[in-house]
Amino acid sequence: MSKEKIVLCEDLADIMPPEYHELVETATFGNQDRGWKDIGSSKELIEQHSLCAGCPESIAFRYILASLPAPEDTVFVGSTGCTSLVFPHVAVHNIHSLFGNQNAIASGLKRTLKSRFPDVEKDVVVLAGDGATVDIGLDMTMQSWFRLEKFTTICFDNELYANTGGQESGLMQKGFVAKMAPKGKNFEKVRLAEIAREAGCAYVAVLTVSKPNRVEQVIKNAIYVAREIGPTFVQLYTPCILEIGKQSMEGLDEMKDSETIGGRFVQKEYITEEAQKLLDSIKEETKVRKKAAKAAAAAK
Amino acid sequence: MNKQVELKGKRIIASNHVKLGQKNKKGQTYTDINDIFFKAEQEPNFLTGSEVIKEAIKRCSVGTSVAYPITPQSEAAALIGEIYAEGYLDEYFRGESEFAVMGQCAGAAFGGHRVFTTTAGPGTLRAMENFPMWAGSRLPIQVCVTCRGINSPLSIQPDTLEMHYLLETGMLVWHAETAQDLYDYILKGFIVAEQPDVHIPIAVCCDGFFVTHTKDTVDLSPLDLCLTPYDPYKSPVTCMDMESAPIRMMRDPFIMKSNYINYSTHASWQQEVKAAMERSRKHTIPLIGGLIDEENTDREILIVGSGTAVSQSREAIRLLAEDGIKVGLVKIKTIRPFPYEEIKRVTKNAKHIFVPEFNIAGWLAREIKSTIPDNERVYCGPHVMGGMTMPSEVIVEEIKKHLGVETGNLMDM
């Protein structure tokens, strides 16, 4: 979309809500260097969230939306769960259709946008929970990777079905006692990152959302690689503090604990050679561009 | 209940599309549906039903089609692949299951394409969760359902039970009797479903094998004319292509069970889908010549049917006439919206109403029974199921048995 479209009609400006004025005036549409540091100084693309107080998913949402390279041409595909409570408050087009079919929707959508807008890069980003991605939707998740569909899949891994009240999921740790696993889960956490790598993803990352700069980099990498090369996958640990018996302020500690050496979420990436080359060249270009901008600013 | 719409001289207001009159990359001219059917000369061809689906799609300016093999629609789905390779469609691929295929179709429709797919029997049921989602999302996707058995033990034979499950999905459901109907309904179905005041999905159903795998003479419109393309910006809901300004869609997500507004939003949304279906009547009637066809409905004995049951009934009526039993015929073309008023009108004088069906449930008879007064007049049958054919003699026998006639000497019926 042309950024000029995100403007206010003068005659109707006085009846538009203040949030929309802010969106037009201070959001970061069109700024290719936008990132998590804009949070607090510009209008975010998430208006408010309807998640539990202190939910790490809510901060993950904010980091992701702040990191999109081109939100003015990005469409999200969600699934049923806690994420579907947030999407109505988000200032990018997003689709909720059913539970688990997100990668099927994204496949049809990405191909259609490619066909309708051959000269514009329209990013499609799937964002769904672990139940949707791994259990009910695994078939469609993997098949989209097999077909090398060019979009990014993000999984909010909270290791259980949070929205329905804390039932066992495939990404839950072995031994964890939960609803529907009354004697403890009796098989290992599904190794989704490895599945993604083997199924054809050109870029795979696993991490927590404790460090915004890391989240930003990973999301940007995933979207850039999906544009040029093929499917990408990002698995983010966003613990459900409610269902694992933590307090509102304990989400960050939980994530930090899980990413220390030997933890389940020590950051890892699988990058194909082709994808690495692309990311290196983008890094170089960005460096040159920023340097030139700095020099230009200094010259003024 | 619907009001009767006068047919004479009516044309659907189909297309003031910007591309009207222009040529596509195959050299076909984007043409108003009225001109395609009512002005251009139609040419007879001898084709199977599957080939007819292919010929129809060649003329439909379809953006995306997603395929998956299941008998008896596999051939049609593969033939669409062939015309994709020839450049008639923008996008075509094989999905991984009917559930996924219908999701992929939804994604393409959310993104602004005209979308066509085909399915059958167990595939229709596997896809089922998607159909009310399509309707609720106001996606005017067309699925051609080539009906077959859904029961266990496994059957691939024709049986229309799956249509029963489609009735309350919020989709338009049309039932083709012949390959000619199939051709007409596919082209016309897109135009009706995509009207801004309708904009809901459509299932164009036909009886598997009887229609798909037999050859019939079908009048085709000229290949150098095709439908005007789908315009996603006439949709009553936003096209998900980030080409219009993003808005905050609602104060609270629909799913929050927190306040009255949310409840009433849900209620009115469902009512709106239903109302959209009702509004489709005024577009459908001029295009397909009414929701029903009728022959001799002043008679006391009527057969009311849909699909190939109508063809069998026509022959049964001829046989009964030889015995002096005069029977009228009603062919129902649209099951959703259901022609309530039409059925009430044409059955007004009937004393015996027979509803032959290719399924065990008798859903059409049930529908008619719930529509007309004095519904003990409706005889639910004859039924065949599991892929059995319904010879006209079976209908004749059932009617005679019910009337208490063993041999044909009822000259004054």
Image (cartoon, rainbow, N blue to C red):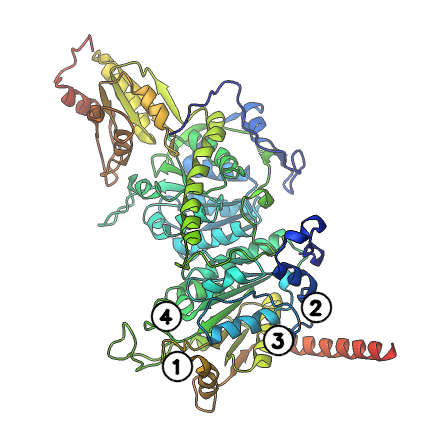
Residue corresponding to mark 1? A246
What's the residue type where badge 2 is placed?
A: Asn
Mark 4, residues whose alpha carbon is within 10 Å: few (<14), some, or many (≥20)?
A: many
Mark 1, residues whose alpha carbon is within 10 Å: few (<14), some, or many (≥20)?
A: few
Which-is-in-front pick, marks 1 and 3? 1
Which disc is residue A36 wearing? 3
Which quadrant would residue B322 be assigned to in this image?
A: top left
Report the Cα–Cα distance between label 4 and label 3. 28 Å
Which disc is residue B162 wearing? none
Which disc is residue A31 wearing? 2
First along the sequence among labels 4 and 2 = 2
First along the sequence among labels 1 and 4 = 4
Report the Cα–Cα distance between label 1 and label 3. 26 Å
Report the Cα–Cα distance between label 2 and label 1. 38 Å
Percent across and percent down for residue B289 are: 45, 24
Check the image and report above or below for B124 versus A256: above
The chain containing the residue under callout 4 comes to: A
Residues B304 and A26: in front is: A26
Percent across and percent down for residue B105 are: 48, 51
Check the image and report above or below for A90 versus A171: above
